[in-house]
Amino acid sequence: EHGLDGDGQYNGTSDLQLERMNVYFNHASGDKYVPRAVLVDLEPGTMDAVRSGPFGKL
């Protein structure tokens, strides 16, 4: 999503998308992007599903 891979690195091709990346993500060390906010259901099953999913490393 937003041109990011599962490790938070930008792999997109749009200059405009990269320019606006700071709307939703903070630029971290190692040229990675981390979400500015994460809104999730705190029910244990939902948390486990997010952690084990493709973006669990973010």
Image (tube, helix red, strand yellow):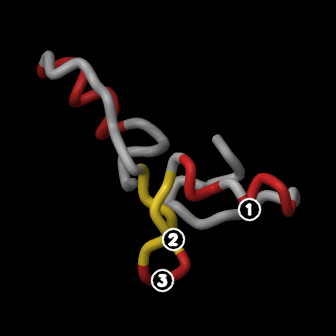
Front residue of 11 and 19: 19
Q: In which quadrant will I find the N terminus?
A: top right
**Which amino acid type corresponds to the residue marked 1 in the rendered image?**
Glu
- The numbered mark at residue 30 is 3
Residue located 85% across and 63% down the image: 15
Please tell me which of labels 3 and 1 falls first in the chain.
Answer: 1
Neighbours of disc 2 within 10 Å: few (<14), some (14-19), many (20+): some
> Would you say the residues marked 2 and 3 are in contact, meaning their CB atoms lie under 8 Å apart?
yes
Position of 44 relative to 5 (above/below) = above
Location of residue 4 in the rendering, given as x and y in whole percent from the top left corner: 63, 54
**Quarter of the rendering containing residue 46:** top left
Earlier sequence position, callout 1 versus callout 2: 1
Q: Is residue 27 left or right of residue 15?
A: left
Q: Which mark is residue 19?
A: 1
| Residue behind mark 2 | 32
- 3 shown above or below 40: below
Secondary structure beneath disc 3? helix
Question: Taking 17 as reference, is 7 left or right?
Answer: left
- The quarter holding residue 50 reads top left
Instruction: Give the amino acid type for the residue marked by disc 3 in the picture.
Output: Gly
Judging depth in this view, the residue of 30 and 20 nearest the camera is 20
